[in-house]
Structures are given as structure tokens and as C-alpha cells.
Image: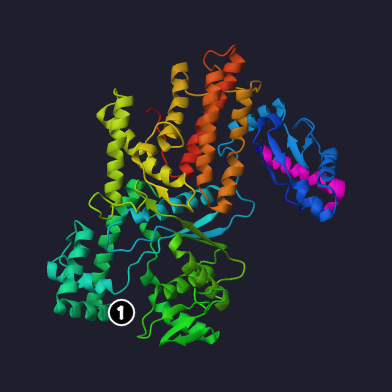
């Protein structure tokens, strides 16, 4: 255990048990980094909640905890402030020892979870037969960061890309494939959007084509071999386009992670049968519906979840119920995470309520719905092209790399063309991902090139530059890294502040694994970069007053660089040795 927060929490728990009895040892110590360094490094406010349970004055409770608190080289004697806050200031010696342990830890305090879980993360989920656009950006990026965080803590993550690869539009597209010649040989569709739009125009204008498309849907759902072969080709062509985006975006999704709606097609009748057996089904205007408890519409009437249309067709809800049952029963996971935009909040909540009522999800399985807001243009309207069309993701990524190249060329003109291309790609892609992830996912965010590519502030270029800046110190010092046997010493305020920030990496990552809010990782990075900047300005490294201090500060520099690289990596963002 290298992070101070965990050690303080453990000692407060021991003090509570000693002062009030073991039965209170499970009380949450509620320890957080102090917002004001004048009062200490950490603050605990457990006395308020514990005082209420005990029927005692919170300040008196806090004083009893402090009296039993074992400082033992960890900190100075804690102080009670206000109504019962406990302020704790760590000793220089403890900070130096903790920083030394952190520097020697390949994982920098990001320790495996005590009880690793099997976790499904359902994210990205584009509709096939169209190219991925900016509307798919947030689910893909946020989901990827969540997967990386969970895997870093030793959880077994099952990535699920629940793509839309089934439905009535595929009859239209297959007919257009046949008529356009795209069904022959290994022909690739250059532009999926143009192909879809051309098919849709024919579907709307040509009654004969419209009827053939509808019949093709019947053939598809009936398992006609020729139709299925054409459908399979169309899906593979769509996946090829998606893979190009995933590769350039640098996300972990692979073809093996695809779990389309078609996967569950054969399971849908069983879903209806089992809902009926549980006496959950009702009829409404010929359709089969379920009324989950607790969902009331604007008219104060119960809200239905439609699971089968009057013509016998199934809906997204039916497929989602089949999918969640498969994940609970067949994959036997401990937790299921859905990453979708906030407009799906009610649908997912109702679907999960029905799944629980029907026994499709084991009681022990935790379910989380990670919602997010929209990407807006600088006019605060949904982000569009200048012509008002949907922005293709591949075009967006290319534009970002080009804009990044112009910024990098101005700042570092001596890079070769190959170096420039690499730096521009890493900075450009990182800028888009970080701008998304640094925003509270529950809110809309404004897409601003100027802000996301800025070399100052809470941006990817600033974090990447901070990393490159740290690594440049070693080049200037003429060494590859800190010398073997270097020992950390902590005496200056800026050294304290930097070490305190480094020690928060483990608790921050664990917190994000629980609350699934990646913007806290970005907040951590920004605070770390600022702490290092103050350290670098006030604590000479290469020109340190003596060799031991120089070695100590080089070790802190190296640990900072590794922390920046690790946390940026959890966000799916690469670092550069030079930029």
C-alpha cells in the first residue's frame, strides 16, 4: 500500500474501533485530500456521521478519534477543526518513503482489486451500413477509457460492440447492392453514406424497388441463404469502414468484440415466452408490452415497454432483454456497464427493470448506465459540417491531425517530415479524445478546435507537452534516467506538493473504476502537471545544490513522467518524447 489516503483511512478505522468499539469499525472514514494546504494534507469528516449515530457531539467524537490515532511516523498530531473535521499533515520522512516506494512500483500504486470481477462493457454500438459519425464519438471514447481503467485494476473485461446489423433497412440495402453490382465479387463500397442515401432515395421514389426491398426483409428474417450471404457481405463491408476509424482512434475494440443485434435473433421468441410465463406480458393495441413498476408517463399512466409489435415484429427492447440475459447467464459476469447517450436513459432503465422482474439478470449482478451529453458546435447546436451535414468521424480525425501539424510546425520547426506526421497524429487524436473525456460526461460539451489544441490549460497537448518537457530534462542532463540507488528527499514545499499529487494516483483510478467518470482522471493529470510545473520552477534539478538532491529530484521527475504516461494511457492517449 503506497497511497497515503488508504493508510490514513485504515488508521482512522483503528482509532474508531479503539474509541467506540469494533462494531463501529465499518464506518466510512471519508478521507479526502485537503482543499487548503495550510490546514494539512488530508481531511477526514467521519465525526459528523458517526456523531449522529452515537448521539454525541461531532467535535467530541473527532477529539476521541484523534486521541486514539497512531501517528507512528505517518504524520504530525492531527488537529480538530470546526464542527469536527480532522486535519492531517504528513511528515517529510513519510512522504519521502512513500515516494520511494511509488518510484519502485511498475504500476505506480495502481494495485489490483482485492476481488477481481468479470465485467461486460457495452459501448460504441454504431448502426452498420453507415459510416461512423461524430454521434458515435463519445460512446466509443468514454467506453474505451472505462475498459482500460477496469483492466488496469485486474478485472476481466468483456468488450461488447452491440452494433445495429439487423432490421428493415437491410432489405433496402441488399436490393441496392444487387442492382448496383456491389453484390458481385470483392467490390468495396467507397462511401457507405452515399450508398445508403442512394438506396433510400430509390426506396422512397420507386414503388417496385420498395416492394422488392420489403420482400427481401422477409427473405432475410426467414433465413434465405442467398440473402444471408449478401447481408453478410454488407456487414463485413460496414465493419471494414468501422475498423479504419477504431484503428486511427486507437481504441481497443476488435472484430471479436462485435455482438450485433442479429446475434440474438433466435432468442427473441424465448424472451416473449418467458415474459408471458412470468405473467408480465399485457396487450396494448395489438402489441405485447410490459409495464415495469415505477415508470409513469406525463399523463400519470403507467409507461409500457413494447417487446413485440402487433405484426409480430420485435424491437430494440426485445433484443436488449435477450442480450442482458446472455451476459448474466451465459457469460456469468458480475457487472454490466452500458455506455450510451442520455436520451437512452429511460429506455435502459425500463429494460433493466423488466429484466430484473423476469429474472433475466441475477440479483448479484451490478448494472451501470454510463450516460453522456451531446457534442455541440460553437453555436451551441448539435455539431454539424458547414453544409449542415453529419460530420464523419474519419474526416474529423484527419482534420484534427492537420490542425495539430500546423501548431507543432510553428513550435518545433526542426522536426523531419516523418517526425512531424507522427507528432501531428498523436497530438491531433489525443486532443479530440481528451476534450471529450475531460468534460463531465453527463453534460453537453462544445467542440472547439482552439481550446482542444491549446498548449495551455486542461488539454491533451498540454499534458503531452508536460511529459515531453520532463523527458527533456534527462536529455539535458545527459542521462537516460535517475541513477540507480537514488533516494527521495522531501524538504521544499513544491516537493511536498508534487509527492502528495503522485500519491493520489491509485485512489483516483480506483474511484473512476467505481463511479465511471473519466473526467476525474483528466482533473488528476491537470493537477499533476501544475504541481510539476511549480516544482520545476522552484526546485532546480540539473543545477541542484548537491548530488543527493539532484538524484532525488531526477527520481521525482521520472516518477512524474511515468504517472503522466500511465494516466494518459488509461484515457487511450499516447505520449511523445519530443514535441
Q: Where residue 346 sits: x, y (%)?
A: 49, 67
Figure colour scheme: rainbow
The N terminus - image quarter = top right
Q: Where residue 17 sits: x, y (%)?
A: 83, 48
Q: Where residue 27 sits: x, y (%)?
A: 76, 52
User: In the figure, is residue 186 to the left or right of 67?
Assistant: left
Q: Residue at x 60, y 23 (%)?
A: 485
402 is higher (above) or lower (below) than 288: above
User: In the figure, is residue 214 to the left or right of 266?
Assistant: left
Q: Which residue is drawn at 52% across and 48% down?
A: 149
Which quadrant holds residue 358? bottom right
Magenta highlight on residue 20: yes
Magenta highlight on residue 297: no
Q: Which residue is drawn at 56% across and 39% down?
A: 107
Q: Looking at the magenta stretch, what is its main secondary structure?
A: helix
Q: Where residue 337 sits: x, y (%)?
A: 51, 60
Q: Nearer the viewer, residue 157 or 208?
A: 208
The C terminus - image quarter = top left
Magenta residues span 4-22
Q: Can residue 488 be seen in this view?
A: no
Element type where label 1 sits in the image: helix
Q: Name the residue under label 1.
A: 221
Report the residue that reaches farthest toward the front. 299
Amino acid at each position: 500500500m503506497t497511497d497515503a489516503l488508504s493508510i490514513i483511512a485504515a488508521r482512522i478505522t483503528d482509532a474508531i474501533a479503539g474509541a467506540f468499539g469494533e462494531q463501529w469499525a465499518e464506518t466510512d472514514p471519508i478521507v479526502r485530500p485537503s482543499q487548503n494546504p495550510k490546514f494539512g494534507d488530508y481531511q477526514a469528516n467521519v465525526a459528523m456521521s458517526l456523531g449522529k449515530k452515537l448521539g454525541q457531539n461531532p467535535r467530541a467524537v473527532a477529539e476521541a478519534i484523534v486521541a486514539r490515532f497512531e501517528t507512528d511516523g505517518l504524520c504530525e498530531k492531527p488537529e480538530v477543526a470546526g464542527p469536527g473535521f480532522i486535519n492531517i499533515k504528513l511528515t517529510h520522512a513519510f512522504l519521502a518513503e512513500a515516494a520511494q516506494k511509488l518510484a519502485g512500483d511498475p504500476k505506480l500504486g495502481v494495485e489490483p482489486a482485492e476481488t477481481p470481477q468479470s465485467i461486460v462493457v457495452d459501448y460504441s454500438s454504431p448502426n452498420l451500413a453507415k459510416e461512423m459519425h461524430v454521434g458515435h464519438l463519445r460512446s466509443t471514447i468514454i467506453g474505451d477509457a472505462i475498459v482500460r481503467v477496469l483492466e488496469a485494476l485486474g478485472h476481466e473485461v468483456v468488450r461488447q460492440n452491440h452494433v445495429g446489423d439487423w432490421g428493415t433497412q437491410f432489405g433496402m440495402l441488399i436490393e441496392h447492392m444487387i442492382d448496383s453490382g456491389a453484390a458481385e465479387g470483392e467490390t468495396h463500397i467507397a462511401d457507405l453514406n452515399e450508398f445508403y442515401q442512394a438506396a433510400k432515395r430509390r426506396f422512397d421514389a420507386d414503388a417496385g424497388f420498395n416492394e422488392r426491398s420489403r420482400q427481401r426483409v422477409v427473405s432475410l428474417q426467414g433465413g434465405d441463404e442467398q440473402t444471408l450471404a449478401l447481408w453478410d457481405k454488407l456487414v463485413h463491408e460496414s465493419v471494414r469502414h468501422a475498423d479504419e476509424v477504431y484503428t486511427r482512434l486507437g481504441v481497443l475494440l476488435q472484430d471479436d468484440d462485435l455482438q450485433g443485434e442479429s446475434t440474438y435473433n433466435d432468442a427473441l421468441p424465448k424472451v416473449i415466452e418467458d415474459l408471458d410465463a412470468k405473467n408480465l406480458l399485457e396487450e396494448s393495441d395489438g402489441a405485447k408490452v410490459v409495464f415495469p413498476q415505477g415508470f409513469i408517463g406525463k399523463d400519470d399512466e403507467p409507461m409500457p415497454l413494447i417487446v413485440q409489435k402487433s405484426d409480430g415484429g420485435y424491437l430494440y427492447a426485445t433484443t436488449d432483454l435477450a442480450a442482458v440475459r446472455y451476459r448474466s447467464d451465459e457469460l456469468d459476469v458480475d457487472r454490466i456497464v452500458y455506455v450510451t447517450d442520455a436520451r437512452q436513459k429511460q429506455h435502459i432503465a425500463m429494460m433493466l427493470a423488466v429484466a430484473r422482474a423476469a429474472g433475466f439478470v441475477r440479483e448479484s449482478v451490478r448494472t451501470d448506465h454510463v450516460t453522456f451529453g451531446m457534442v455541440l458546435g460553437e453555436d451551441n447546436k448539435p455539431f454539424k459540417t458547414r453544409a449542415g451535414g453529419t460530420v464523419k468521424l474519419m474526416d474529423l480525425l484527419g482534420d484534427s491531425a492537420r490542425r495539430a501539424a500546423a501548431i507543432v510546425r510553428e513550435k518545433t520547426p526542426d522536426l523531419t517530415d516523418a517526425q512531424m506526421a507522427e507528432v501531428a497524429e498523436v497530438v491531433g487524436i489525443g486532443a479530440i479524445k481528451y476534450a471529450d473525456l475531460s468534460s463531465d460526461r453527463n453534460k453537453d460539451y462544445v467542440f472547439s478546435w482552439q481550446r482542444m489544441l491549446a498548449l495551455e490549460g486542461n488539454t491533451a497537448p498540454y499534458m503531452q507537452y508536460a511529459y515531453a518537457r520532463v523527458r527533456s530534462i534527462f536529455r539535458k542532463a545527459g542521462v537516460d534516467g535517475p541513477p540507480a540507488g537514488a533516494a527521495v528527499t522531501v524538504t521544499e514545499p513544491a516537493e511536498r506538493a508534487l509527492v502528495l499529487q503522485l500519491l493520489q494516483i491509485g485512489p483516483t483510478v480506483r474511484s473512476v473504476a467505481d463511479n465511471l467518470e473519466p473526467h476525474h482522471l483528466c482533473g488528476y493529470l491537470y493537477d499533476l502537471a501544475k504541481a510539476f510545473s511549480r516544482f520545476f520552477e522552484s526546485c532546480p534539478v540539473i543545477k541542484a545544490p548537491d548530488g543527493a538532491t539532484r538524484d532525488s529530484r531526477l527520481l521525482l521527475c521520472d516518477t512524474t513522467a511515468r504517472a503522466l504516461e500511465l494516466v494518459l494511457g488509461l484515457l487511450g492517449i499516447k505520449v511523445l518524447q519530443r514535441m
